[in-house]
């Protein structure tokens, strides 16, 4: 009799613990609030201490502007330094900081199909006018098979555009 | 020879000289055949055109259209070296389907090219980055011409050469 009671209380306790954990997990997995803005200003890509060719920085910047404009989630995409940008009240600034870069080799990729991959990782940081961080995520772009090394910037820009799509 | 015919000849030769002079003045100096990679909104990737410096302006001509950027609005100029596939584009991709690894052999043939990267501001102050492929051995002189026309650069042209040489050493 005693063991039955003990067993019942243990089951009840386990049930309560499971319910509590379940609610906590569901609270964590709840979709974050979307960021509302009418414009994103794309800032120059910060290479930080990573050794990276200026060609990749320029290509990443241009691909970011193109992909975010194509995305259409945010109506206006401004370039850094644009005279119209400071007048926008709800302006969000996007700053990409390079964290890792591997140039790879197009020739190696085509000859071996397994070696020579290009990889570029950045921290994509979205801040408001006051400098408050609204969203910060690590984003990585790759080229594994076809295309030149610069295509890594296109892949990365597409991922940033996807991030904007999910959070704005 | 009559005096009237002498006068006519001299007038014609004067007119011809004037025409040649005008043509020479209009032709941009140091026009280079280039391949646009990215950065000029009206141009597509891998589009061929010419890049020239005329009256303090960088002129990119492609498909009978031309884009002008004042050299003074160019904030930074970088040069480098790269290589591109001898057989590129769709044909280059199709060669990958060739039997017995034939496509891989074709992809090993590559042309050496120079790269020039221009960071500039548009009329509204917006930042742009653009990349062009140039014939091998021409980028350094073109950078010097651009700087002479009023462009700015954080790295002097000769330092660019030294830097690329060190990079090659590092890779080895």
Image: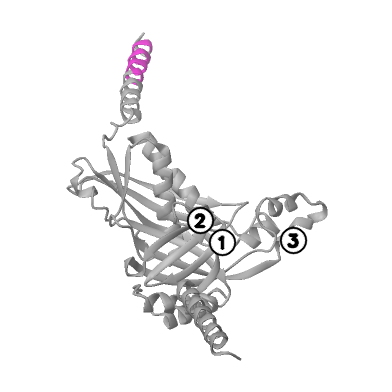
State the extent of the magenta-drawn residues as a range.
A4-15
Q: Residue at x 50, y 76 (%)?
A: B19
Mark 1 vs mark 3, foreground winner is: 3
- Contact between labelled residues 2 and 1, with CB atoms less than 8 Å apart: yes
Q: Are marks 1 and 2 on the same chain?
A: yes
Disc 1 marks which residue?
A: A104
Q: Looking at the image, which is closer to me, B32 or A103? A: B32
Task: Assign the magenta stretch its main secondary structure.
Answer: helix
Q: Looking at the image, which is closer to me, B150 or A45? A: B150
Q: CA distance from mark 1 to mark 3?
A: 19 Å
- Residue B6 image offset from top left, x and y in percent: 55, 88
Q: Chain of mark 3?
A: B
Q: CA distance from mark 1 to mark 2?
A: 7 Å
Disc 3 marks which residue?
A: B106
Q: Residue at x 74, y 61 (%)?
A: B106
Q: CA distance from mark 2 to mark 3?
A: 25 Å
- Callout 1: helix, strand or loop? loop
Rendered image: mark on residue B31: none
Q: Is residue B114 left or right of residue B25?
A: right
- Callout 2: helix, strand or loop? strand
- Residue furthest to the right in view is B100
Q: Are marks 2 and 3 on the same chain?
A: no
Q: Is residue A130 magenta?
A: no
Decide which of tag 1 and tag 2 comes sooner along the chain. 1
Q: Is residue A52 visible?
A: no
Q: Is residue A13 magenta?
A: yes
- Contact between labelled residues 3 and 2, with CB atoms less than 8 Å apart: no
The quadrant holding residue A46 is: bottom left
- Residue B122 image offset from top left, x and y in percent: 33, 58
Q: Is residue A23 above or below residue A53?
A: above
Disc 2 marks which residue?
A: A119
Give the quadrant of the C terminus of chain B.
bottom right
């Amino acid at each position: 009799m005693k063991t039955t009671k003990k067993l019942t209380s243990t089951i009840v306790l386990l049930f309560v613990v499971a319910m509590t954990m379940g609610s906590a997990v569901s609270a964590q997995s709840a979709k974050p609030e979307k960021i509302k803005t009418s414009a994103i200003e794309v800032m120059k890509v910060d290479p930080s201490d990573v050794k990276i060719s200026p060609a990749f920085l320029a290509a990443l910047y241009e691909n970011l502007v193109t992909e975010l404009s194509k995305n259409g989630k945010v109506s206006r995409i401004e370039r850094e330094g644009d005279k119209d940008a400071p007048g926008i009240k709800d302006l969000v600034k996007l700053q990409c900081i390079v964290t890792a870069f591997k140039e790879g080799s197009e020739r190696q990729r085509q000859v071996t199909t397994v070696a020579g991959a290009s990889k570029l990782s950045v921290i994509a940081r979205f801040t408001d006018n006051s400098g408050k961080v609204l969203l910060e995520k690590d984003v990585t772009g790759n080229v594994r098979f076809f295309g030149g090394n610069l295509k890594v910037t296109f892949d990365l820009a597409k991922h940033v555009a996807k991030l904007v799509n999910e959070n704005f | 020879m009559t005096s009237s015919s002498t006068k006519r000849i001299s007038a014609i030769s004067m007119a011809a000289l004037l025409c040649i002079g005008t043509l020479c003045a209009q032709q941009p100096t140091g026009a280079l055949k280039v391949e646009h990679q990215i950065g000029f909104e009206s141009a597509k990737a891998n589009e061929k055109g010419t890049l020239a410096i005329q009256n303090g302006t960088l002129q990119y001509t492609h498909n009978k259209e031309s884009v002008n950027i004042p050299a003074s609005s160019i904030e930074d100029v970088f040069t480098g070296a790269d290589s591109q596939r001898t057989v590129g584009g769709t044909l280059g991709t199709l060669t990958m389907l060739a039997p017995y690894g034939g496509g891989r052999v074709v992809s090993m043939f590559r042309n050496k090219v120079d790269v020039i990267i221009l960071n500039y501001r548009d009329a509204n102050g917006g930042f742009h980055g653009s990349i062009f492929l140039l014939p091998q051995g021409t980028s350094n002189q073109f950078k010097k011409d651009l700087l002479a026309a009023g462009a700015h650069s954080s790295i002097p042209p000769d330092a660019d050469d030294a830097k690329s040489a060190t990079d090659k050493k590092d890779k080895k």
